[in-house]
């Protein structure tokens, strides 16, 4: 046993020291990623706290406020149009219990006149524009604005149409594939592997396992973005639907396990942008940047721009 420890302890010590060194100096093993965009200001659902979510009015307002990236979700109508909508079922957004996929574009209902902001409980947004936007219209109006598109369903036709639009408007370098599910992300990447892509939930778990085991500095990563909740917002501005996330102990542990400044600094040094969301108060924006986030996603683009201007983080 003593001879085993004689060999294993120095080996473990050497591995630990090497891992720590490479965690701080990833350029030794990895070439820094060079994306065509670098965003500190990201507007969630187009800035849905200041205008009705995911409408052309919201996207226009966010860009006017200086946002550097629009975040949105897409679904496919019954007649094959790619529509910007967070939900497939439109009850929350319109009051009508119908799905995007069951309706033709012309039959989509209007958004409610006042819509509750999901990540700021008790707050509502309104606006003159209550129509669902087409992804093509967003691409056409904002040709140089980076956009993160979350795909929520493994629908090959939807994914293919998104990819076709991205190619048609020459946006492959500034449009990001995003999805919680790895199976959907695999389909997205099979359809168009020229677009940058973000971590899925399972890949995020793998990332944490690599980080805590010390293996992360040795492993290549294909993703260009990590987009994740700032747990600090749970049960404050955001009330989760899942009962487990309303438990203070669970949220505390989630925060301690995931919000690791050394992890975010390592990713940033490798050229992987870290976006924390959804930060709708100055204190949350500050907390995200102090943790090492390279960008913050907010429902309030004017609020975020004001914070960045005061703190000189935005060019």
Image (cartoon, grey):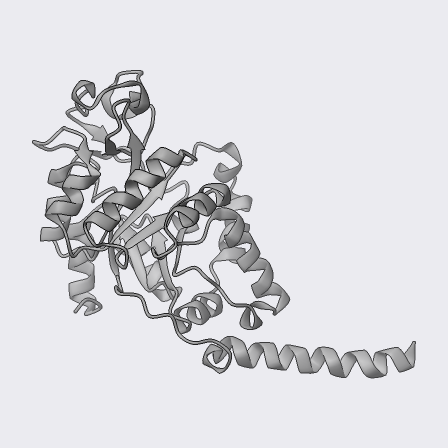
Percent coordinates x, y for residue 157 in the rendering: 35, 34
Query: Which one is nearer the viewer's eye here, 197 or 275?
Result: 197
Q: Quadrant of residue 93?
A: top left
| Residue, far top | 97
Percent coordinates x, y for residue 14 in the rendering: 68, 83
At a point 59% along the width and 63% down the height, the residue shown is: 210
Which quadrant, please, contains the C terminus? bottom left
Task: Tell me if 199 is positioned left or right of 116 in this view.
Answer: right
Percent coordinates x, y for residue 112 in the rendering: 19, 23
Query: Which one is nearer the viewer's eye here, 196 or 62?
Result: 196
Which quadrant, please, contains the N terminus? bottom right
| Residue, far right | 1
Percent coordinates x, y for residue 151 in the rendering: 37, 40
At a point 51% along the width and 32% down the height, the residue shown is: 243
Q: In which quarter of the image is residue 11?
A: bottom right
Task: Tell me if 13 is positioned left or right of 103 in this view.
Answer: right
The vertical placement of 190 against 38, above or below, is above
The vertical placement of 28 against 268, above or below, is below
The vertical placement of 9 against 45, above or below, is below
At a point 44% along the width and 46% down the height, the residue shown is: 185
Number of numbered tags placed on the structure image: 0
């Amino acid at each position: 046993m003593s001879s085993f420890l004689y060999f294993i302890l120095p080996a473990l010590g050497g591995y630990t020291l090497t891992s720590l060194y490479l965690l701080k100096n990833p350029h030794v093993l990895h070439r820094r990623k060079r994306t065509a965009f670098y965003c500190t200001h990201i507007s969630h659902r187009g800035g849905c706290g200041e205008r009705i979510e995911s409408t052309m009015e919201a996207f226009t307002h966010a860009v006017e406020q200086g946002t550097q990236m629009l975040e949105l979700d897409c679904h496919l109508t019954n007649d094959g149009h790619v529509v910007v909508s967070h939900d497939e079922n439109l009850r929350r957004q319109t009051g009508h219990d119908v799905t995007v996929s069951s309706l033709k574009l012309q039959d989509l209902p209007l958004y409610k006149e006042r819509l509750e902001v999901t990540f700021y409980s008790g707050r509502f947004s309104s606006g003159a524009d209550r129509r669902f936007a087409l992804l093509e219209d967003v691409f056409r109006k904002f040709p140089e604005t980076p956009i993160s598109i979350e795909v929520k369903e493994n629908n090959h036709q939807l994914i293919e149409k998104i990819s076709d639009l991205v190619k048609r408007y020459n946006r492959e370098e500034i449009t990001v594939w995003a999805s919680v599910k790895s199976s959907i992300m695999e389909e997205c990447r099979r359809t168009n592997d020229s677009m940058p892509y973000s971590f899925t939930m399972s890949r995020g778990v793998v990332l944490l396992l690599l980080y805590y085991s010390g293996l992360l500095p040795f492993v290549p990563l294909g993703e260009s973005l990590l987009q994740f909740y700032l747990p600090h917002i749970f049960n404050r501005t955001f009330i989760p639907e899942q009962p487990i996330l309303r438990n203070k102990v669970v949220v505390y542990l989630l925060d301690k396990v995931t919000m690791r400044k050394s992890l975010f600094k390592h990713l940033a040094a490798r050229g992987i942008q870290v976006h924390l969301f959804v930060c709708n108060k100055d204190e949350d924006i500050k907390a995200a940047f102090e943790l090492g986030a390279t960008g913050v996603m907010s429902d309030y683009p004017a609020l975020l721009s004001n914070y960045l201007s005061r703190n000189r983080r935005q060019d």
